[in-house]
Amino acid sequence: MLQYLWQHKNWTEFRWDANALLVPLGECRLRQGRLLERVRGLGFELATEAVADVLVAEAVQTSAIEGERLDERAVRSSVARRLGLPSVGLPVSRDADGLVSVLLDATQKYDEPLTAERLKGWQAALFPTGYSGIHRIIAGEWRGREPMRVVSGPLGRETVHFEAPPVERVEAEMQAFLSWWGKSRWKAEGILRAALAHLRFLTVHPFEDGNGRVARALTDMALAQDERESRRFYSLSSRVMAEREAYYDILERTQKGDGDVTPWLLWFLECMQRALESSEQLLGNVLAKGEFWRDHAGVPLSERQRKVVNRLLDAGPGGFEGGLTTRKYASLAGVSRVTAFREISQLLEQGMVKQNPGGGRSASYAIVWPEKVVKERIAAAYGFLADGVKPLTEELLAERKKDFSDK
């Protein structure tokens, strides 16, 4: 007869093969360290941009995993307002605001105690109207007496993937979870603790709706505690969304298992590795801007010049359509064309911009990206990964640079 994880005696005494986890855990730590080292050198403004990009991705994707679609522009508006970034013209959404507030509370206040009231507040924030879609739900409290099942398929022929503990057990199970959460922070390996917290919470399934989103917020909180970093620079939910079928499959197999959670932990570690890898793509432009300003840290610039250069950097490798011209510079900086020409000439002398082919009245300019950024973009575009199939040799680099000369 099928038994779910929670039906086993002492079900929270999980077992795993430590030797099987050693290599993937080491790889995870290595990638985590590399990413955090890069982003911690960004400076306040660029780091805030990076956090905003990750937070938008996390909010949109953690909802998408559950089949909920949030307006990305509304999410960006909510994130911008909370981080002090420009949000003029962006729409406002209560649902987006609620989720963003949960994600920020989980990470920015990772050192504050986790309580039943805090968890209930998170869940209530996800459903500000008290409805999930068109259905009235219990918000801000543990779930009611209806059996909690995860099912799929047509009515009458449903497949039950998981059944949660009866409501009579929820209060005690959550007290046990909160007690474990507090004690394990100082005893357990941090990434494995995040994976176990995710699994334990979903096993209890304490809310009528929103359990997945709250579980992923808890995972982010556990990782923030492990890194001692309130800012998130990678989105685990984005990776889970990309592998949603595998995510639900491994959870179902674990819930129907005998307490050996090695496969779940392996999947989590590998998923996190891929999240860390894809973060460099998500934050590509912010990291490139960081490299650019590190290369030109000692260059004296006016506020006008810095503003225009940042606009060029924000445009990415392609730059402005048609390049930067004196007319565009004058418009952006609010100066005459004579002043614009003089200030562009100074940027040319400093090696920050270069003149595009052509000249005269049609002269235009583009950013001179640092060598490291050019190599990374070539590697990404042509599939030469840092750990990859084919090393990016100097010969290959020279061959491909021509393709990127105007970018």
Image (cartoon, rainbow, N blue to C red):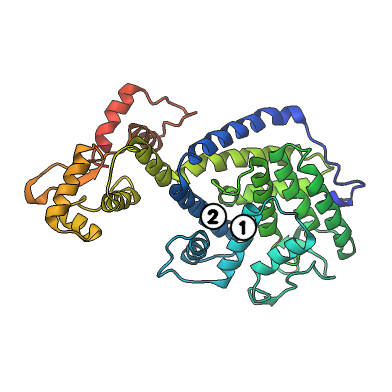
Circles 1, 2 touching at the beta carbon (< 8 Å): yes
Query: What amino acid is at disc 1?
Result: Leu
Decide which of 127, 186 is in the foreground and name it.
Answer: 186
Q: Where is residue 176 in the image (x, y as percent from the top left)?
A: 86, 52
Q: Position of residue 59 (x, y in %)?
A: 56, 58
Q: Where is residue 261 in the image (x, y as percent from the top left)?
A: 77, 40
Q: Residue 55 carries which label?
A: 2
Q: Can residue 316 be seen in this view?
A: yes
The residue tagged 1 is 103
Q: Can residue 67 be seen in this view?
A: no
Q: Position of residue 54 (x, y in %)?
A: 52, 51
How far is disc 1 from disc 2 in space, using C-alphas?
8 Å
Seen at 33% across and 50% down, the residue is 310
Residue 55 sits in quarter:
bottom right
Seen at 75% across and 67% down, the residue is 208
How many other residues sit within 10 Å of disc 1, few (<14), some (14-19) or many (≥20)?
Answer: many
